Amino acid sequence: MFKKILIANRGEIAVRVIRACHEMGIAAVAVYSHVDRASLHVRKADEAYPIGAAAAAESYLNIAKILDVAARSGADAIHPGYGFLSENAKFARACADAGVKFIGPTAAAMDAMGSKTRARQAMERVGVPFVPGTSRGLESVAQAEEVAARIGYPVMLKAAAGGGGKGMRLVHASEELKSALEGARSEAERSFGDSEVYIEKAIINPRHIEMQVLADEHHNTVYLGERECSLQRRHQKVVEEAPSPIVDADMRRRMGEVAVRVAQAAGYTNAGTVEFLVDQQKNFYFLEMNTRLQVEHPVTELITGLDLVHLQIRIAAGERLPFTQKDVDIRGHAIECRIYAEDPDNNYFPSPGKITLLLAPSGPGIRRDSGMYEGWTVPMDYDPLLAKLIGYGTDREQAISRLTRALNEYFVGGIKTNISLFRRILRHPDFRAAKLDTGFLDRMLKQKEETPVDASADAKTAEIAVIAAGMFAVLGPAGAVPGERAEMGAERGDSKPPSNWKSAARREGLR
Ligand code: MV4
């Protein structure tokens, strides 16, 4: 087993991996850019090494600097987290060449799944259903017109090297096809240095459902259940849940077996995710495979009782999976909110700055994977994900009620966050009825909420919190608000009523 693991990442996922290392008795090495020198992952690591300026190319994307720290620290393995170098085949090769174990798939498996057309060709070979269309790049407008006529409009043009919605064009009629193809090609060339574009039948308002797979280095591959990831804004996931409300045991088995076939076709090892588009008739189609641990992995951990990072580390160390498919059990329901430093009143633009007050939720069924702390300054240089708040319950209703309670406990002072967005989503009737598809969030954000509770409640809550914080700062714990004494006193049998502040805070949802 490894003695020391370098985490080539930052933020909440770096903290998450460090925690797994410590639970396994493995030392954790952090790397950090200058602006991250006071970050939580630096504080929690056993050793921390500066690797350069804020720009990712100078730091978290710099292969040479990261491998240099691995050598200097004596790390025997590297966990890439997600984003940054996590799906970079060149980095996986460089780790192997340096004799440092990359905790993830091989470079060859990444290459096999990195190109959407190569992936579709692999699926064709093993009979995995993918959206009708071509599995190779389009050679000409004429060919595009011929395929589009065969599969029927609307069609979707996609960049082979793309992903996450970049380089996609929805085409409703043949007259639009030529210019859309030229546009998609030039965008693909600009964004990915590869102008290959293929065509698919467009699925209207699909669901995005993904299947977690796990494979050891001894050809054992299992699926761990699916995640419903349809609540996205601009191809950024906002809320994820497991299991999907529309997937029953039979559909889960069929999707899972397809996902395992995909992983085996790619020679996949370690944790991976097979993404599907699901249409209104619950037909599912292979979309792409993500060759990394996903942001939303906690919802799968909560319903299976497995720790995916522990398992990743054990697999990378050559261990066999300690269970088989029949042992995988789905129990309960988990829903995750991605807490971003974004301003909902300013088009969700990033809202960096100093966190002056942090009231964080906990209690039954609440998990918080966080990279922030009170007093920390959120840098503007990276993805503004602050934390993930996950609610778990025996069923979806209990998960929603716990998450709602926890969101009402969450307060981050000094910066804006999107916490209010989740309060709105969780009380939306279509969300509660599990009427989800990839257009849900766009439709909801276009609607003016019937009872605009949020804005006023949030403003008042924020005002109360700031005043309370001010009083606390001046009066300190000793001068606690009379009600608190009463509250504490109550534990000692005093009979004074709770203070007005506490009652007001309760009324406004600041528990
Ligand atoms: C599609 C589609 C409809 N039909 N392909 C978006 C990102 C990439 N993962 C694939 N995406 C889509 N591909 C066909 N043939 C609709 C989307 C899509 C989408 C898919 C999943 C989650 C969110 C989405 C938001 C917009 C469009």
Image: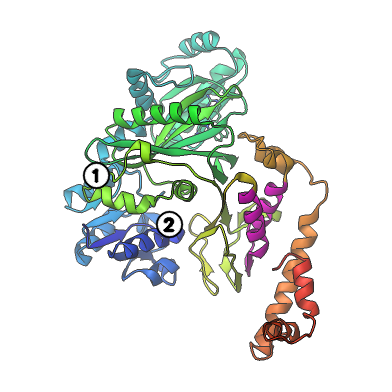
Of labels 2 and 1, earlier in sequence is: 2
Residue beneath the point at 23% across and 44% down: 93
Cβ atoms at labels 2 and 1 below 8 Å apart: no
Q: Position of residue 178 (x, y in %)?
A: 54, 17
The residue at which mark 2 appears reads as: 13
Up/down of 222 relative to 396, above or below: above
Out of 175 and 488, give the one closest to the viewer: 488
- Residue 233: tell me if it is visible: no
Q: Is residue 473 magenta?
A: no
Quarter holding the C terminus? bottom right
Residue beneath the point at 19% across and 64% down: 74
Residue beneath the point at 40% across and 56% down: 56
Neighbor class of circle 1 (other Cα within 10 Å; few <14, some 14-19, many 20+) is some
Up/down of 388 relative to 171, above or below: below
Image mark for residue 189:
none
Out of 102 and 172, give the one closest to the viewer: 102
The residue at which mark 1 appears reads as: 320
As shown in the figure, which amino acid type bears the numbered disc 1? Arg
**Residue 9 picture quarter:** bottom left
**Residue bounds of the magenta highlight:** 398-427
Q: Position of residue 241 (x, y in %)?
A: 55, 44
Neighbor class of circle 2 (other Cα within 10 Å; few <14, some 14-19, many 20+) is many
Position of 239 with respect to 59 (left or right) is right
Position of 343 with respect to 92 (left or right) is right
